[in-house]
Amino acid sequence: MTTVTLQNLQKSFGDVVAVNSIDLEIEDGEFLVVVGPSGCGKSTTLRLLAGLEPTTDGRIEMGNRDVTGVEPKNRNVAMVFQNYALYPHMTGRRNITFGMKSSGDFSDAEIESRVEDAAETLDIEDLLDRKPEAMSGGERQRVALGRAIVRDPDVFLMDEPLSNLDAKLRIQMRAELARLHSALETTTVYVTHDQTEAMTLGERVVVMNDGQIMQVDEPQVLYDFPANRFVAEFIGDPAMNMIPVDIENGHAVHDAFTLPLPSGDDSPSTERNGAGDTRISDARHAILGIRPEDFRLSDVQTDDGLPTIDAEVNVREPLGDSLLLHCSIGATACNIQAEPRTEVHAGDTVSVTYDPARLHLFEDKTGEAFYHSGLHLPSDEQVVSQVSK
Amino acid sequence: MSTREIFDSRIESGLLLLPTLLVSIVFLYYPTALAVRTSFFDSSFGQVDEFVGMENYVTLLADSGYHSSLLLSILFAAVVVAGVISVSLYLTFLIHEVDTGQGLYLISVIWPYALPPAVGALVFLFIAHPTLGVLTGPVEALGIDVDWFNNGPQAFVVVALAAIWKQIGYNVIFMIAAMNNIPDTLTETAELDGVSGIRRLLSVYVPIMTPTLFFLVIINTIYAFFGTFAFVDLLTSGGPSNATNILIFDLYQEGFSFFNFGVASTKSVVLFLVVGVLMLVQFRVTEEYSYYGG
Ligand SMILES: Nc1ncnc2c1ncn2[C@@H]1O[C@H](COP(=O)(O)OP(=O)(O)O)[C@@H](O)[C@H]1O
Ligand SMILES: [Mg+2]
């Protein structure tokens, strides 16, 4: 059992607060991804877990053992780095065995059999006698993974392990990591700046910004119910549109449109959702969030009485599987994702509708989300069971 | 682009090279050629040089004093090179491992290198003088009778220590640069694996640093043969009873105490050849064992 618990974890470098009061519970066998923009403190958090940096404040527990001040070698964690960190003068085999041999905790026969197992799991038998310079990036990272798994650590810590690989290999390795994790079921903390990687790999995803945790949730929940503007804009590519509006009587009012905010009467949690909520009935400023793919060009007459919004197309980006339109709605810049091969050109004015179940409202000042028009909230058990299917 | 053509005309580039070329010819190549020529002559003050063919070389071949000087020099160089490399490596490692005050430690290690050799020799005299030396008391407390003015082996050790002490700074500068170049993630991987510090130094850092280390072995070899004159001259003058009479000091005495320019030139040619052959061997070894990037 290796649950990892972070309590009020803090780390400062002089004036820079790299990690600001993090509380987090990582479950046994979980694949947890930490994602955020570069410089937000992801690596520092991981290094605190590994013991490579002393904490400024707070507490780290692994398997109910307080490891806050414990030496890295006594934490039984293995780390995989972005630059592979292979010893350049050693063969693949020696790279894998060097740590085990030096620590003296393992017999030679034990090491031998573990290397064979790891090599088979990772399909790196033919790399064992090569030096890193004779390996490709993907092969190096595989050997580095081999080195991590032979020790059978309690926790894997991975700091952007795929970021040095080219796009195609990255996707392939991503799948392999997922396979490896389901085979080993070792608690894993995986750091990346790439939200796609986070979404595809994480059983749960921690979104960080400025040394703080913005939200921890399953990937789809993060996407559908972002807790604040930061998460909303960081998760999803192209990013969610943020449109300043005034809330009046359950409507979002913008210079260029007025759209009704669906009532959430049938929601189990009307307190936080729907027109009965004072937060969308009282007049106030807010930010309306709509994802580019939740807009629809409305020339097809299937829209049931939804208001249409006029948008002027500035730039047209064919992405192959879709067409991304950079538009202006009134004075607000907005991205709209349309069907590929749609005959729309820069300078055209198009009329769009939206998916009424996919509207988000954020506080003007703090950026906290206070309304999602979708009927299910992340706190509902109903949703959790749906997502985990 | 394999060839770089920066200058339009050969004359222009030639002109720019001229100062360097002139200095090299006047102060390096011409004296070298002259020394080789003089080695075949009987040459001294107040007489015309007389060509003697291989006679000077034959003399050296039969001179048992010269043989022991040659052996002594090789032993001295081996001790100095090994001492400088190992002590510098260890000091570099310690400096590399400290988190704060790296600069201060570096400066305190490097300063002997910044001294002119003669000043360095005098400073070391104050450190190791048999009666007045700062270190003499503590060493005698260990039960060693410090008497290197009369004791040959002790004198050899003292001169070697002085030579090592002076050269450490130079080595540390290169080694710390090489060591700091090793990615931190290698260190951290080793730490997570519970690899001990010394094991990390010897099994991870040293192999990666081999190009720098071999360069330093070559430089230190040249230093041990040519750059240690001041220590011998000021600390022991080759004595007691030739215990520190290494080749560079021996040939200096031959030339400038006994004014046998011919034999002195022969000795410098031989020294040049000895060091040349040693370096050739070292380069071969380097090719074989050095690890270059990748
Ligand atoms: N050793 C260090 N010394 C000083 N500042 C550091 C150090 N390591 C990280 N930082 C700072 O801490 C912040 C977080 O860094 P890091 O955890 O590496 O970010 P991330 O991995 O999310 O890109 C950054 O502002 C960075 O400049
Ligand atoms: Mg990082």
Image (spheres, rainbow, N blue to C red):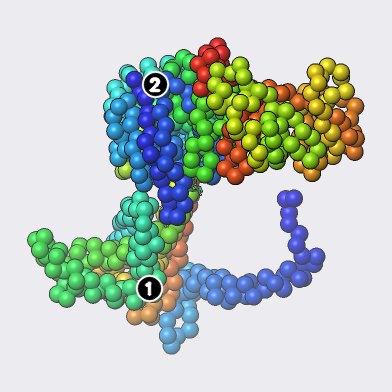
Residue that carries the numbered disc 2 in the rendered image: A28
Q: Is residue B82 visible?
A: no
Amino acid type at image mark 2: Asp
> For the residue labelled by badge 1, is the local secondary structure a helix, a strand or a loop?
loop
Q: Residue at x 77, y 65 (%)?
A: B7
Q: Is residue A189 left or right of residue A312?
A: left
Q: Residue at x 84, y 39 (%)?
A: A314
User: In the picture, which quadrant includes the C terminus of chain B?
Assistant: top right
Q: Is residue B103 visible?
A: yes
In depth, the one of A335 and B128 nearer the eye is: A335
**C-alpha separation, residue under disc 1 versus residue under disc 2:** 61 Å
Q: Is residue B174 left or right of residue A313?
A: left
Q: Residue at x 19, y 71 (%)?
A: B134
Label 1 crowd (10 A; few <14 / some 14-19 / many >=20): few
In the orientation shown, which residue stands out farthest toward the bottom? B46
Q: Would you say the residues marked 1 and 2 are in contact, meaning their CB atoms lie under 8 Å apart?
A: no
Residue B102, given in percent of the width and then of the height, sits at: 38, 58
Q: Chain of mark 1?
A: B
In depth, the one of B120 and A7 nearer the eye is: A7
Task: Name the mark on residue B115.
Answer: 1
